[in-house]
Image (cartoon, rainbow, N blue to C red):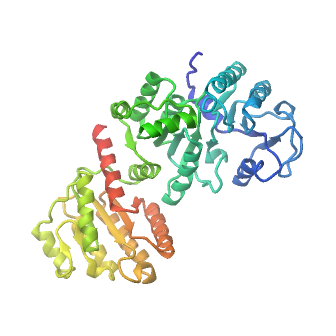
Amino acid sequence: MAEIVVDYNKFDSLFHPSSIAMVGISADISGAFMMRILLEYGFQGKVYPVNLSGREVLGLKAYTSVKDIPGPVDYAFLQVPAHAAIQVIRDCAAKGVKLAALFSAGFSEGDKERGTELEQELVSIARQGGVRLLGPNCMGFYCPAARVTFCACSPRESGTVGALCQSGGNSIQLVRSAVQRGIRFSKIISYGNAADINEADLLEYFAEDPETKVIIAYVEGVKDGRRFFQALKAAAQAKPVIMLKGGQSEAGAAAAFSHTGSLAGARKIWDSLLKQAGTIQAYSIEECLDIALALLLMKPPHSRSAAVIGYGGGATVLAADDCYRAELFLPPLPQTIKDELKKVIPVTGNILINPVDFTLLYLSPEKMAQIVRIVGSWPGVDLLILHLRVELTDTGLVEQKLLEPLAEAFIGAAKEVNKPTALVVHAVYSVESYQGFLKVQQMCFDAGLPCYPSIQRAASAIDKIIRYHQTK
């Protein structure tokens, strides 16, 4: 089958439809679920339900075939049985549909022989008719600018992170996880079995997309290894690419084959390929977002010399270990800086080296800010990790109404110092503390500061962006 070269402008138009057909949608709660999400998200164009009965759905007139729809249709979302998809794609081609997303499973990921034959026939009909396909076995796409989504509670604001995701469920997790972190997407494209539009197409697309500054990719397997590597390398040269490879273990590879029909490949080969391409490798969705936050909100540090400032003796010791594992260097503070700190911090009960612990001062946000300014102004460090333990005492910072003032003090001092800084808010156990953490997380994002739930995650993300900038 001939390879289709991605034309950016034509490809981009696929994700900005003015009309959508929802095929296989019924009036019951489960059958109308995806259409309800689309309507509630505020899609501004025409929406046409299509079902065999012709009964209206959510107050909209339904049609028994895509061909019967009176106006043009740009995008068709199909939730029909696999055996019915062939005829629906024929109808889409006859109607002039530009893009069809197949939510349906039952193709190459299922019955390998019959399912693969069905999938190939589907692609052949689509290409002959000028229809591009997402899937089968996918969620479609999320594009805030076009008011199209597959996930309830999707943010309406566009962002600068683009994502291609082979798993529909992981696509939803990306949306939901990113909401609380402050990250917004240009687009998330779920592509499932990649029968037509595949990972190389999407990497080439996001590499050119001016709305996308950072790319996140969840990939289980590839259709064409050589083209994929070329597309990945070109994308990584254009902008940061964070790659989460699914199916690296034997069990994961078996699951990937069953999930999307993907041949996952050996871990050593993938590790080498991703390194050669210049990508940033992540090992979880959470880590993808950790790294994206650091890339978006943190200036590239000049070196690995860091200062860790917070409170809690044990937390300070563990912070040093976390930084060591992330290969961040914690240079000891010179005597001049220690002398300045002693004017603010009682020596007894605190640690005046690096990390700096000021447990006895957590009741005074202004003094905490002063410590950040003193240490942060020292030329011997190029980045700061500031940490707040929410439930250090029996009552905790939220109950004492100290969490937000302390966070404000840290954020304000960090802005004054003007060095790459991450804020860590950890030891969060109660519902009230978690709500406080979410407020601080939003405060940080609004101030342009990445926020993390542990020192380990902050240090790891910083390590990876430093490595990335060094290779560039």
Q: Quadrant of the C terminus?
A: top left
- Residue 269 vs residue 347, the one in the foreground: 269
Residue 247 seen in the current view: no
The residue that appears at 54% across and 29% down in the rendered structure is 201
The residue that appears at 16% across and 68% down in the rendered structure is 353
* Side of 110 relative to 451 (left or right): right
Name the quadrant containing residue 404.
Answer: bottom left
Residue 240 image point, x, y percent: 40, 40
Q: Quadrant of the N terminus?
A: top right
Residue 393 image point, x, y percent: 36, 81
Q: Would you place residue 307 above or below residue 67 in this image?
A: below
The residue that appears at 77% across and 49% down in the rendered structure is 32
Residue 417 seen in the current view: yes
Residue 247 image point, x, y percent: 46, 38
Q: Would you place residue 240 above or below residue 323 in this image?
A: above
* Side of 104 relative to 417 (left or right): right
- Residue 306 vs residue 429, the one in the foreground: 429
Residue 470 image point, x, y percent: 27, 41
